[in-house]
């Protein structure tokens, strides 16, 4: 299976110059989605994981399904103002703006082993903010996992202290 072929590229969205990698085409194909989740599960099933952190919004899809498959807790990292309880915050920048993400302050206990999951790593802004939140709560990050990596944007460098795994890459963006 060539996963990259199942991901649609939308030029100039959300702003001119951005080549958006749309994973909704992957999600709409049940066999491809199942195969994607099976690759993640196979990679992590023998590793002790306490919590899976999924990043708003598409990271929720992959992270929650993987948490279910592994029988572990799922923790959402949401955009500011979306969580109902006391939160900690981290600011981040993207290739087309900046924002703040939050996590409930009681989501992770010190020493818990955490896997961070998102659909895509580009500049690394969002995942670096999630890393800060997990570390602030004392979680131990095992790896940051993505469906897609855009290596030209060097996002991996922003989280260089951590292992990174991506299922496919798109060059030349």
Image (tube, helix red, strand yellow):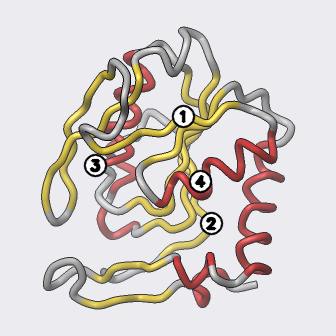
- Please give the residue where the numbered disc 2 appears in the rendered image: 167
- Front position in the image: 84 or 110: 84
Other residues around mark 1 within 10 Å, as few (<14) / some (14–19) / many (≥20): many
Q: Secondary structure at mark 3?
A: helix
- Please give the residue where the numbered disc 1 appears in the rendered image: 75
Mark 1 or 2, closer to the camera: 1
Q: Tag 3 or tag 4, which sits nearer the N-term?
A: 3
Q: Quadrant of residue 49?
A: top right
Image position of 150 (left or right of 112): left
Report, in whole angstroms, how far the alpha carbon at label 1 lies from the one at label 4: 19 Å
| Image quarter in which the C terminus is found | bottom left
| Image quarter in which the N terminus is found | bottom right
Percent of width and height locating residue 86: 33, 18
- Please give the residue where the numbered disc 4 appears in the rendered image: 165
Contact, CB < 8 Å: mark 2 with mark 4?
yes
Q: Tag 3 or tag 1, which sits nearer the N-term?
A: 1
Report, in whole angstroms, how far the alpha carbon at label 1 lies from the one at label 3: 19 Å
Compared to residue 7, the image places residue 53 above or below, namely above
Mark 4 or 3, closer to the camera: 3
Q: Which mark is residue 109?
A: none
Contact, CB < 8 Å: mark 2 with mark 3?
no
Image position of 160 (left or right of 28): left
Compared to residue 44, the image places residue 136 above or below, namely above
Report, in whole angstroms, how far the alpha carbon at label 4 lies from the one at label 3: 16 Å
Other residues around mark 4 within 10 Å, as few (<14) / some (14–19) / many (≥20): some
Other residues around mark 3 within 10 Å, as few (<14) / some (14–19) / many (≥20): many
- Front position in the image: 79 or 70: 79
Contact, CB < 8 Å: mark 4 with mark 3?
no
Contact, CB < 8 Å: mark 1 with mark 3?
no
Report, in whole angstroms, how far the alpha carbon at label 2 lies from the one at label 3: 19 Å
Report, in whole angstroms, how far the alpha carbon at label 2 lies from the one at label 4: 7 Å
């Amino acid at each position: 299976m060539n996963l990259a072929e199942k991901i649609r590229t939308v030029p100039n969205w959300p702003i001119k110059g951005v080549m958006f990698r749309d994973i909704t085409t992957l999600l709409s194909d049940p066999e491809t989605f199942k195969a994607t989740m099976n690759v993640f599960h196979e990679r992590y099933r023998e590793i002790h994981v306490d919590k899976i952190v999924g990043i708003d919004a598409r990271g929720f899809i992959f992270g929650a399904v993987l948490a279910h498959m592994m029988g572990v807790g799922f923790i959402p990292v949401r955009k500011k103002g979306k969580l109902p309880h006391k939160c900690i915050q981290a600011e981040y920048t993207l290739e087309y703006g900046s924002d703040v993400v939050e996590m409930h302050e009681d989501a992770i206990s010190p020493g818990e082993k955490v896997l961070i999951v998102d659909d895509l790593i580009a500049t690394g802004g969002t995942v670096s903010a999630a890393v800060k939140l997990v570390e602030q709560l004392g979680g131990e990050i095992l790896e940051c996992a993505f469906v897609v990596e855009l290596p030209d944007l060097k996002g991996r460098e922003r989280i260089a202290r951590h292992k990174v795994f991506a299922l496919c890459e798109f060059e030349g963006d």
